[in-house]
Every structure is written in C-alpha cells, then in structure tokens.
Image (cartoon, rainbow, N blue to C red):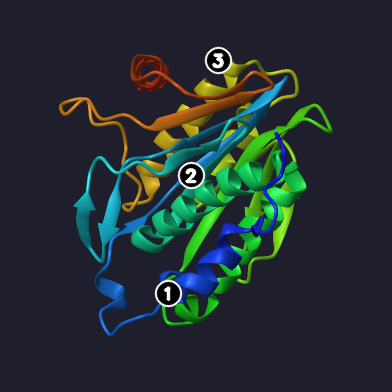
Amino acid sequence: MTPLSGARSSFVEHLAEVAPEALVFRASEGAADVPHGTTIVAVAFDGGVLLAGDRRATMGNLIAQRDIVKTFVTDELTAVGIAGTAGIAKQIVKLFTVELEHYEKIEGVPLTFEGKANRLAGMVRSNFGAALQGLVAVPLLVGFDEAQARGRIVSYDVTGDWHDEVGYHSIGSGSAWAKSSIKKRFRPGLDADGALDVAAEALFDAADDDTATGGPDVLRKLYPTAVVITSDGAVEVAEEDVAAATDRVIAARGAQA
C-alpha cells in the first residue's frame, strides 16, 4: 500500500485540527452519577493472550447496566478492556480503533505493538484533567507482538504511563480478588482453553467479593465476554464457550460445598 502524501498519519492530530472539541473530556458536577465499568482480566498462554471482562456497570450503589461489553477488538492483533467511567473509556477505545485504521491507511503499514501502546497512552493522558475530577478511565491493552512472536499485556495508570505485565493482569474494582485467583491457577504453558478457564474463575471470584463486579447471570444467560489473540488474529470467544467455562467453575464450587 502506498502512503498518501500530505496526510497526517495520526488521526488524533488530524482531529485536533478540524474538531478539537471531540478530544476534550470535561468533568461535570454530576461526575459521580455516571456508569462505571469494573473488572477486566488478561491471561497469557502459549502463542497468544486472552482478555475477559464481566458485564456489570454501576452508578454509585445502583446497577446501571447488567449486559455492558467491556472488551473490544481494536484491530487484527490487539484488543482493549476498559475499567472506570464507561462513557469516556468507550470513547477512548473508539478513537484508538480509528487511529489504528487511519495510520495503516496513511502509512501503508500497521503500527508496531510498541507504537499502539504509546498511542493509547497519549489518549489516556489527555483525560488526566477529568480523572482528577473523578472521571477516571483506564484501559488494559493486549495483543500479539509480531516482532517478539508472543502475546503481550500492557497496563496503564491515569497519567498514561504504561507497563508490560508478565503472565497475567487485572484492572478495575475487583482486580485484587481476580489477581489472587489467577495467581493460584496460572502456569506457563497454558493453552487458550486453559486461559479461558482461569479467567472465568478469576471473574467469578471477583464477583463473589466485589459488589461492582457482575457474576454469571444464569437466569438472563449473561456471561463474561472474552477475546483470544494469536498470530492468526483477534477473535471474540463464542458465548457458549464462555458459558461452558463458567459452568465448569460453578460445578466445581458446588462440589466443594
């Protein structure tokens, strides 16, 4: 693909010129009364990485939504999970997705994984003013790094600083319980199915202790969402596969009771 002359490779820079208001995140007096996403987990396995998230959004002590989606495929080899203020986090993900597509169209090649991590960092950093007023939005980036031939997990803080995580990670209000759960079951050499089982149990444990994390809702048939990424690409895990993994966790807990 031949790069287009005279065009900016950064969609964010282009947007800053033609519609800067689209990049401004302004907090309001009602900052506490907006939906918040909760727990996201990422688990690396041989040849790739898995991202999963629960389905609950909360607004103070209320359940704002029971079926929110917090895991998003952003291009062929990356995905993002969100925690924090849902509206702002979703806007960041949408902008990031367009940014990756725009860069590839202009430059003729996709961004490297490092480049993607840095672009997302800039978007998180642009929300820092709103974060100081309570509208925190934090992503968890996962993807397959072709240069290193492995799955990678990248976490962010509210300033946009990012770090490589080894093996697994979790963000959101239930992350402490999720990471404790993963720590017991994670091992090098997992396959994709094993990673899904580990993630399903981690989200189950987080929901058991954190009221802002939604557990599996068998009555409404609402289960976590998940994305698997390998060198072949990013694929959303079928709902029946996630349900089966969750049912295995429930059955195992029932046997222990």
At 62% from the left and 40% from the top, the residue drawn is: 142
Between the residue at mark 1 and the residue at mark 3, the CA separation in whole angstroms equals: 39 Å
Observer-nearest residue: 92 or 19? 19
Point out the image quarter for the N terminus. Answer: top right
Which label sits on residue 193?
3
What's the distance in space between the residues labelled 2 and 1, CA to CA?
Answer: 23 Å
Q: Is residue 5 left or right of residue 205?
A: right
Depth order, front residue of 99/173: 99
Indicate the secondary structure of the residue bearing disc 2.
strand
- Label 2–label 3 contact, CB within 8 A: no
The kind of residue tagged 2 is Ile
78 lies left or right of 85: right
| Mark 3: few/some/many CA within 10 Å (<14, 14-19, 20+) | some
Q: Residue furthest front?
A: 5
Q: Residue 143: give x, y in percent of width and height.
A: 65, 36
Quadrant housing the C terminus = top left
**Amino acid type of the residue tagged 3 in the rendering:** Asp
Point 23% across, 31% down: residue: 217
Is residue 41 positioned above or below 250 on the image? Answer: below
- Position of residue 73 relative to residue 12, above or below, is above
Among numbered discs 1 and 3, the one appearing first in the sequence? 1
Marker disc for residue 40: 2
Residue beneath label 1, please? 25
Element under disc 1 = loop
Work out how far the residue at label 2 is from the one at label 3, CA to CA, in angstroms: 18 Å
> Which three-letter amino acid code belongs to the residue tagged 1?
Phe
- Badge 1: how crowded within 10 Å, few (<14), some, or many (20+)? some
Which x, y percent locates residue 212?
Answer: 33, 53
